[in-house]
Amino acid sequence: MRPRIPRKKAGAISVDAGQLFRFAHEIKSGDFVVYPSKRDRQIHFGKVTGPYRFDVADEQTYPHRRTVNWLRSVPRTKFSQGALYEIGSAMSLFLVKNYAEEFRSAFEGNANPPPVSEDDTVALVAEDIEETTRDFVLKRLAQDLKGHPFADFVAHLLSTMEYRTRVSPEGPDGGIDIIAHRDELGFEPPIIKVQVKSNEGSISDPVVSALYGKVAHGEFALIVTLGTFTHQARTFARSRTNLRLIDGEELVNLILQNYEKFDSRYKGMLPLKRVYVPEPLKLDD
């Protein structure tokens, strides 16, 4: 029988259980501990000096206990951006791997981070944050908006870009999922015929050419997919000025650019907040 914990998802329960198991059974006396404190913005170093114990009488909120001898505290400013990012994990207990040597040097009193202008990890951190966000957006769209709901989402995205849209009803649509236009009645050009693909595979040339065959003179065609396009499909589109292909990566770009204009339904499905990440400083040649 699976354990049930109120307000906890099954995945979160397994992660928490794994951390408790490591805390109780894998950590041993003599192991070093790194603790990043948000209260004083210091990185605290200590050594485990006692066995695991469960002490609900002493502390009901945190009954899982180990004795630690705290030996040294070092300001966060003494570490590279990459090292700080690694210990900013969402998990409470984890093994420091990538920057273990940097933390070991800091503990020994040899903290010597590179100048900010020369810290190569700044770019790596920014890229990792951006990539994680992109993966989250595409994963949520792929899981929650299969089929016709994805057409509704793309229509809403186009509306934030000041297009008026008409979404085809569910069922056979002749390959055209959305009609987009600027004017209220949909008579004035440009008229855009949109096809959406909620799968994550590659869209081939026959699919692209089939939609383009439905475009009359003065009209435009647009295909939006969560996946990618084959080389042949992109080659076909490259020579047609009234045909645009938007793959998953470009779709995320448009979502991030227009996110503030999304309605509450889609903001709730894609909960994002604006953050600023450092860019690597450009040195003069």
Image: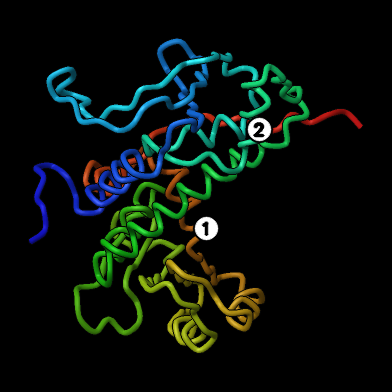
Please state which of the two labelled residues, at mark 2 or mark 1, is closer to the viewer.
Answer: 2
Q: In this picture, is 209 found above or below 158?
A: below
Q: In this picture, is 229 found above or below 248?
A: below
User: Mark number for residue 279?
Assistant: 2
- Nearer to the camera, 60 or 277: 60
For the point 12% across and 20% down, which residue is it?
57
Circle 1 residues within 10 Å: few <14, some 14–19, many ≥20? some
Q: CA distance from mark 2 to mark 1?
A: 21 Å
Q: In this picture, is 34 found above or below 9?
A: above
Circle 2 residues within 10 Å: few <14, some 14–19, many ≥20? few
SS at mark 2 in the image? loop
Q: Is residue 236 left or right of residue 171?
A: right
Q: Which residue is mark 1?
A: 250
Q: Amino acid at mark 2?
A: Glu
Residue 91 locus on image (x, y percent)? 37, 39
Q: Is residue 68 left or right of residue 144?
A: right
Residue 29 locus on image (x, y percent)? 43, 32
Q: Amino acid at mark 1?
A: Glu
Q: Is residue 162 left or right of residue 21?
A: right
Residue 187 locus on image (x, y percent)? 35, 64
SS at mark 1 in the image? helix
